[in-house]
Structure formats: structure tokens, C-alpha cells
Image (cartoon, rainbow, N blue to C red):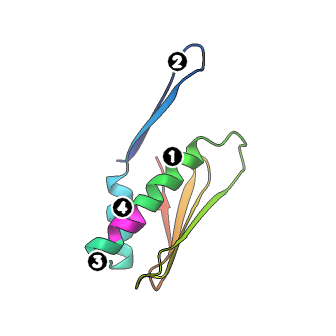
Amino acid sequence: MDRIIRCITSDGALMASAIDSSDTAYTAQRLHGLSATASAALGRLLTAASVMGAMQKQEHATLTLRINGGGPIGTVTAISEPATAMRAAGCGQSNVDARCP
């Protein structure tokens, strides 16, 4: 099970987040049938979208991250909504829906 841990100092001067997104990355790899390299790229993008989406202050806001590295997998997109769902598209495959913790 994936998990995000967030910490903040009492005066609000410092905030830190840590995430274990192994299950999300594995699910994306399995559903898309990705190579190890493409899986790492998509997993990292989904992880970034998860952390940034969890930090959004608006309840119904959506965050979209899109990367085009110029390589064989083309443009990869991750869409995150706070504490609900995450979607990924790219890698020459159709959309993937994966539930967040």
C-alpha cells in the first residue's frame, strides 16, 4: 500500500514530505506493459504528481504534469486530484486509472 507522510514544524517554517509509491509504479508498469526504463520514468512522474496533488489546498483542484523527454516513449502525462485518484497517459498506451491512498 502506498503512503505519503507529511511533517511541518510548529512555526510553519519547514515542511517535509516522504512517499512510498511502489505499488502505484508497479501497477502502472503492469497495466502499460513497460520496460524498466519507461516504468521508472512513469513511476517518478506519478510519484511527483502524488506529492504535489496531496499538497494542494483547494479540495477539487486538479494537477497535471506533462514531460516530453524526446525519447521513444514520447510525452508522458500524470494527472492528480487531492486524495482521490491519479491517471497516467503516454508510453504509446491508453489511459490508466490508479487509486491513491
Q: Does 70 sit above or below residue 5?
A: below
Give whichever of 12, 95 is nearer the camera: 12
Residue type at numbered disc 2: Thr
| Residues drawn in magenta | 39-43
Q: Amino acid at mark 1?
A: Val
Q: Which residue is mark 2?
A: 9
In the picture as drawn, the residue positioned furthest to the top comes out as 10
What is the three-letter code of the residue carrying label 4? Ala
Comparing marks 1 and 4, which lies closer to the viewer?
A: 1
Residue at left 73%, top 43%? 58
Residue 40 magenta-drawn? Answer: yes
Mark positioned earlier in the residue sequence (1 or 3): 3
Q: From mark 1 to mark 4, how far is it between C-alphas?
A: 14 Å
Q: Which residue is mark 3?
A: 35
Q: CA distance from mark 4 to mark 2?
A: 30 Å
Image position of 101 with respect to 63: above or below? above
Quadrant in which residue 29 is drawn:
bottom left
Q: Position of residue 82 (x, y in %)?
A: 61, 47
Location of residue 20 in the rendering, given as x and y in whole percent from the top left corner: 35, 45
Q: Earlier in the sequence, mark 1 or mark 4?
A: 4
Q: Is residue 72 left or right of residue 37?
A: right
Element class at badge 1 = helix
Front in this rendered view, residue 72 or 92: 72
Marks 3 and 2, how far apart at CA: 40 Å
How many neighbours does mark 1 have within 10 angstroms: few (below 14), some (14-19), or many (20 or more)?
some
